[in-house]
């Protein structure tokens, strides 16, 4: 069932069962099908120097257009702070995902909230080099004039874990991003209720949103095909290299090539002379 929130989308409750035992940590992903987040125009609409705090916030980057200024005409407004320049700027940041999730266990008596750890999701290089400790400004704050794209940021950029993950380009038409970790086992048959604050609008392009719970194998992912493929391919290369080495060591040659062994240095035989 859906119920309206005051200008903030809807709340949806989805109930499902765990089909097999999942050992901690269980990874909570959200995805958007048909997002095409790897489109060249979309991923180029950002300013890496601005994100890293290298450039002055007053400097403009034309790649950020049409989301360079938080104004209707995307031009400076002297009445706004920093003339309305968005930090972070660009379409990629402006369309920041803003749905939120709560997970509950309905198996026992009552309702138990399952803690989803949303910390330490980004890489260390993201926090130290790619994103600065500056606060966001003029960013997704004006919803009345229709200038707001997605979520806003209330912490310094290098502390906004979900935002740093959102800024990574995707290689497939479907977008998958890690939302958090569940540090407890989920037993088979566990009944869960997912409460979604549905704010992110995907209906304009018939997009589909969803979540995925998964675990890691010893190869790093739940799908071991790539790992097995790499191991088999590496084994084949190793066997081929051993065969070539043995062939080199045990061939019927002294290993030294004299001038007389060369074909053009050999004396012609009597049969060749005739």
Image (cartoon, grey):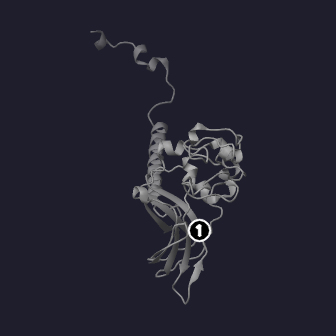
Q: Residue furthest left?
A: 274
- Total marks in image: 1
Question: Residue at coordinates 40% horizontally, 18% vertically from top-left?
Answer: 263
Q: Nearer the viewer, residue 194 or 244?
A: 194
Q: Position of residue 248 (x, y in %)?
A: 47, 37
Question: Residue at coordinates 39% horizontally, 13% vertically from top-left?
Answer: 267
Return the residue at label 1.
181
Q: In the shown orientation, is residue 156 left or right of residue 214?
A: right
**Where is the C terminus found, in terms of image quarters?**
top left
Q: Nearer the viewer, residue 215 or 180?
A: 180
In this rendering, the answer to whether 166 lies above or below 68 is below
Q: Position of residue 84 (x, y in %)?
A: 66, 46
Q: Nearer the viewer, residue 1 or 100?
A: 1
Q: Nearer the viewer, residue 70 or 247?
A: 70
Q: Position of residue 106 (x, y in %)?
A: 52, 84
Q: Residue furthest top?
A: 274
Regarding mark 1 in the picture, which secondary structure is present there? Answer: strand
Residue 23 lies in quadrant: bottom right
Q: In the shown orientation, is residue 224 left or right of residue 141?
A: left
Question: Residue at coordinates 56% horizontally, 84% vertically from top-left?
Answer: 111
Residue 247: in sight, yes or no? yes
Mark 1 surroundings within 10 Å by alpha-carbon count, few (fewer than 14), some (14 through 19), many (20 or more): many
Residue 17: in sight, yes or no? no
**Where is the N terminus found, in terms of image quarters?**
bottom left
Q: Position of residue 265 (x, y in %)?
A: 43, 14
Residue 229 lies in quadrant: bottom left
In this rendering, the answer to whether 15 lies above or below 228 is below
Q: Residue furthest front?
A: 79
């Amino acid at each position: 069932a859906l119920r309206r929130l005051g200008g903030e989308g809807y709340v949806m409750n989805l109930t499902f069962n765990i089909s097999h035992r999942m050992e901690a940590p269980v990874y909570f992903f959200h995805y958007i099908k048909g997002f095409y987040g790897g489109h060249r125009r979309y991923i180029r609409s950002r300013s890496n120097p601005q994100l890293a705090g290298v450039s002055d916030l007053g400097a403009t980057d034309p790649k950020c257009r049409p989301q360079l200024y938080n104004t209707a005409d995307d031009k400076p407004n002297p009445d706004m702070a920093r003339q309305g320049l968005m930090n972070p700027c660009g379409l990629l940041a402006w369309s920041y995902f803003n749905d939120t999730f709560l997970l509950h266990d309905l198996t026992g008596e009552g309702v138990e909230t399952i803690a989803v750890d949303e910390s330490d999701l980004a890489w260390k290089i993201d926090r130290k080099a790619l994103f600065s400790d500056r606060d966001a400004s003029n960013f997704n704050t004006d919803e009345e004039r229709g200038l707001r794209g997605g979520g806003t940021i209330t912490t310094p950029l290098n502390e906004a874990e979900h935002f740093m993950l959102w800024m990574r380009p995707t290689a497939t038409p479907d977008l998958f991003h890690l939302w958090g970790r569940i540090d407890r086992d989920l037993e088979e048959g566990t009944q869960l209720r997912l409460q979604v604050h549905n704010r992110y609008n995907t209906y304009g392009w018939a997009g589909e949103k969803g979540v995925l719970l998964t675990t890691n194998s010893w190869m790093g992912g739940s799908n071991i095909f790539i790992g097995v493929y790499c191991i088999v391919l590496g084994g084949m290369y190793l066997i081929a290299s051993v065969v070539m080495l043995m062939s080199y060591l045990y061939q019927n040659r002294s290993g030294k090539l004299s001038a007389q062994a060369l074909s053009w240095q050999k004396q012609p035989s009597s049969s060749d002379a005739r």
